[in-house]
Image: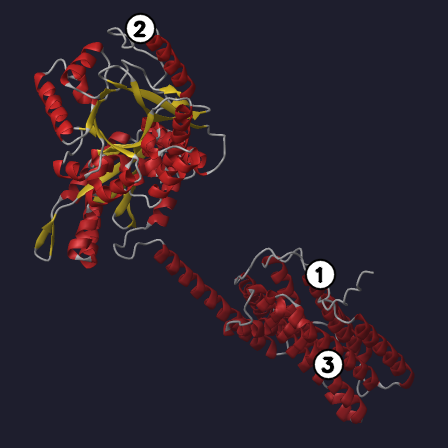
Amino acid sequence: MPATPPPSRDRPPALLLSAAAALVAVLATAELVTDVAGLTAAGGAVAAGIGGAVLRRQVPLRAVEERGLWRWVGHAAVAVAVGLALEALVDLVLRGDAAAWARGAPLTVAAVVAVLCAYQGLLSWNRFRTSASHPADWVNAAGSVLCTLALGAYLLDASSLVTDGPGWAVEGHVVRLAALVVLAVTTVVVTVVGGLLDDPRAWVLAAGLLAMSAVEVVTAPLATGAAVAPAPVLPVVLSWTALTLVAAGSGAVRPPILRGHFASSQVVTVCALLAILTGVGVLVAYALHPGDWLLVPVLAAVGVLGGCVRMFRTIHELAFVASTRKEARTDPLTGVPNRRAMLETVDRFATSRTGAALLVIDLDRFKDVNDRYGHAAGDVVITTISGRLQHRLAGTGLLARFGGDEFAVVIDDPDLARASAVAAALREAVREPIEITGRVVRLEASIGVASTAFGDHRDGELLRWADTAMYAAKRSGGGVRVYDEDADARERAELALADELRVMLTTDDERFGGLELHYQPQLDCTDGAVVGMEALVRWAHPERGLLPPVAFIDLAEQTGSMFALTERVLAQATRQAARWQAEGRDLAVAVNLSTSCLEHPRLLATLDHVLADAGLRPEHLVVEITETTLMHDPRHAVAVTRDIADRGIGLSIDDYGAGYSSLTYLNELPAGELKLDRSFTARLTSDDRTRAIVSGTLDLAHHLGLRLIAEGVEDTATSEELRRMGCDRAQGFLHSRPMPADAADAWLRERDVLTAAGARVLPAPGVVRGPVLPTQVTAP
């Protein structure tokens, strides 16, 4: 059986409000029968007090943004209840003239207090999350009431109504009406300006206030002319009581979804403007048609001054905002516009009919100035260069500092020739020597130039073009570089390819293809037997085709994905080597390791894992390391390669002779072979000096107990010369191009057949064996 939900506390107790309304009705009937005005006022006091208590009880249940409103509305209801209670006391205790002259005063004072409380609540609702208001807001409220009171008094003085009445009979109506009108207008302005048009509670409050104002207007004439008889208390008491109950009931209305914070000074500014217009209108009307009440122009003048206080406050706020906006758009060090101001200017110029050009200037080697002389000296350099650039521009462009050592210039002319000339002049200004603490500093600049003439420049494209050109200039050693759309397209294609590579290597997403290993045979130079395979990675891209390593290896290094790529290559290579071992082929498989992989902390664990997972003995795996890799961190390289060799894994020094050779580390490394770079193999039969280098390398390797593998063997003459010189192994297109695993299996089976038949296994001169596969597919 489902549990009964607890009663909601979001709504005020309807029973209490209904009981209060019933009590007022009963006492009103009693007043008609017994002619006791105090009973009605007492009933209204009780009802208003219940409404205030309900509102104050609901405050903790309201949203944080609304607690201020309903707390102050609750105070207003309590003030009305106190006023009605005092009215009841006057009617029940005082008699005769004393009661007549006192009647209306307590309710009027309470009404003004209630209006001020509600006004404070409306301000807190408008300002959102703050219950505080500026003193000028209170002055504005008082001024608005006085201006409205002056208008009411002037209209009353100009009318034919009899204004003589007991006590506060007429004056009370006018004062209460003025306060109500001000509160009603403020509520409407908050509703419209504050973005509360879809909030029914705001409209309920505004409607209640306007209705109460109408009651005061209708009952005012009834209070005139009565000498001693009680004023018509019933309509007024019932109306003020109803207003408090309406306010309490509006708190139960479900609020709309909160859309945001709409703190604004527009509300009080609009109200101040209305008060000033009202007061000035009364003064003008009184000057044209003077009345008998001198208090009217006094009230109007004081009210106008109150509204002016708020307007002066608004002007001060606007001046502060303008100052803050200027500071937010200015670089504090140089005083020139900052990045935000520059971007606004670029957008304005770029969307104009004439167009614009943008220069991005980056100082080269500025970091050295900060490191050598300190940041204070760096600030001097930045300030000096900024002054020079402004002087050189001489009003032909707007200079801005983007931050750090980067500046920008926008020119309201898209002509590239002019922009390039300006860039060259600015570069010369940067190159002028700067004296700092007795020392001379000389800097260079890399400047990128872009123009709206290149095409669609929306969404910050012009800045991106200039940045791209600047980085291109920096990569080329400095100077001025104009944006190259074709080069930019290539770079963006590379970035897209890098993202695809990262996703492919770090997830199981097959949208971007996968890695394939191609194998190139290594043959014994003596008898032509196949003794090993080098695994070379390819990327089978679904759109770009079969990509060679040159198309993505550098991207893998740049994106930090190189070790993930190497892990996959090692896993595939060891599994293929294990299959060949299971078929009875004693072939070792070689895999290249980059510098980042040799330094990776998981390298040794990965080698152990792939060998164990494939069931391959360590001696059937060879890792190839270039000389450049070894020399990057020689001590670490020696330590890691020894750990690799201790596991029984073969170690080969790749591209020997093409890098920084060091005989010292060659002696310390536990390598088993050297791979002679193809640049030596290609000139072996045509250059005597190359032949001498190869011969000396062979002798060195053999004396160190290493075998030598010659890469790039592409013709029979080179193969025969290597065999005659005593080279151990050869690898190249003469024997086979790199081929997929199934093609490599077919190639091995073909050699088995030729070997069994006693046929020649070395190719004839000029013949390239194996399938001819594309080495590179041009990326779109």
| Labels 3 & 2 near each other (Cβ < 8 A) | no
| Labels 2 & 1 near each other (Cβ < 8 A) | no
Q: Which residue is mark 3?
A: 81
Mark nearest the camera among 3 and 2 is 2
Q: Which mark is residue 44?
A: none
Q: Which residue is mark 2?
A: 759
Instruction: Inspect the image, locate mark 2, and give the three-letter code of the amino acid beneath it.
Output: Ala
Q: Does 434 sit above or below residue 717?
A: below
Rendered residue at 29%/17% (across/down): 529
Q: Is residue 295 visible?
A: yes
Q: Does 578 sit above or below residue 670?
A: above
Q: Does 737 sit above or below residue 149?
A: above
Residue 52: x and y in percent read 71, 76
Q: Is residue 156 visible?
A: no
Instruction: Inspect the image, locate mark 3, and give the three-letter code of the amino acid beneath it.
Output: Ala
Name the side, left or right, on which 344 lies relative to 372: right
Could you tell which of marks 2 and 1 lies nearer the N-terminus? 1
Please state which of residues 361 and 270 is positioned toward the viewer in this rendering: 361
Q: Residues within 10 Å of mark 1 (few under 14, many from 20)?
A: few
Q: Which residue is mark 1?
A: 254
Query: Disc 1 on helix, strand or loop?
Result: loop
